[in-house]
Amino acid sequence: MEDSGLRSRILIEIKNLIASSCTKQKVPPKMRKLHVSILKNHYNAANVSMDYHRRRVEMDIIMDDKDYDPKTVNLSIPTLHTNLWFKNLYDFLESCIDQDPKSLALYSMLLKSYKNNESSLVA
């Protein structure tokens, strides 16, 4: 039961962090990195760029991970270039929150780095 409590606490805290990053008219560079990290994780994407004024996200979605080899230079990984439009930044980013263990570990690390407090959450 404690594990599900920790899971829900991480999810609540990451949603609170997203909410606080979306309230400002101009998004600070540190929060832009948070948004990109969430999108890279959710879409398995590379080269993510966000245009907040036009409400656009451009990214290259990696189609197949089996072609990736960390021991060599990867020049031909199949990707799909995507240009997405979002209506509301918070709703869009919240829809990208995944609940699998790998994502929860990432969110825990993000919370630790963005909320400089002693009570960091560990997955």
Image (cartoon, rainbow, N blue to C red):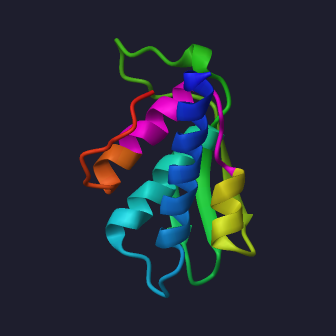
Quadrant of the snapshot with the C terminus: top left
Quadrant of the snapshot with the N terminus: top right
**Residue 53: x percent and y percent?**
57, 84
Q: Start and end of the magenta stretch? A: 96-110
Image side of residue 58 versus residue 47, left or right: right
**Residue 60: x percent and y percent?**
59, 46
Q: Quadrant of residue 54?
A: bottom right
Image side of residue 42 versus residue 37, left or right: right
**Main SS of the magenta segment?**
helix
Q: Residue at x 60, y 14 (%)?
A: 66
**Residue 90: x percent and y percent?**
64, 68
Q: Residue at x 45, y 14 (%)?
A: 69
**Figure check: 61 above or below 115:** above
Front-lying residue, 15 or 4: 4
Kindly tell me whether residue 23 is visible in this rendering: yes
Was residue 106 drawn as part of the magenta stretch in this picture? yes
**Figure check: 118 above or below 93:** above
Was residue 52 drawn as part of the magenta stretch in this picture? no
**Residue 101: x percent and y percent?**
57, 24
| Number of numbered labels in the structure image | 0
**Figure check: 7 above or below 51:** above
Front-lying residue, 19 or 25: 19
Q: Which residue is situated farthest in the front direction here?
A: 1
**Figure check: 51 above or below 110:** below
Image side of residue 1 versus residue 28, left or right: right
Q: Quadrant of residue 28?
A: bottom left
Front-lying residue, 60 or 122: 122
Kindly tell me whether residue 45 is visible in this rendering: no
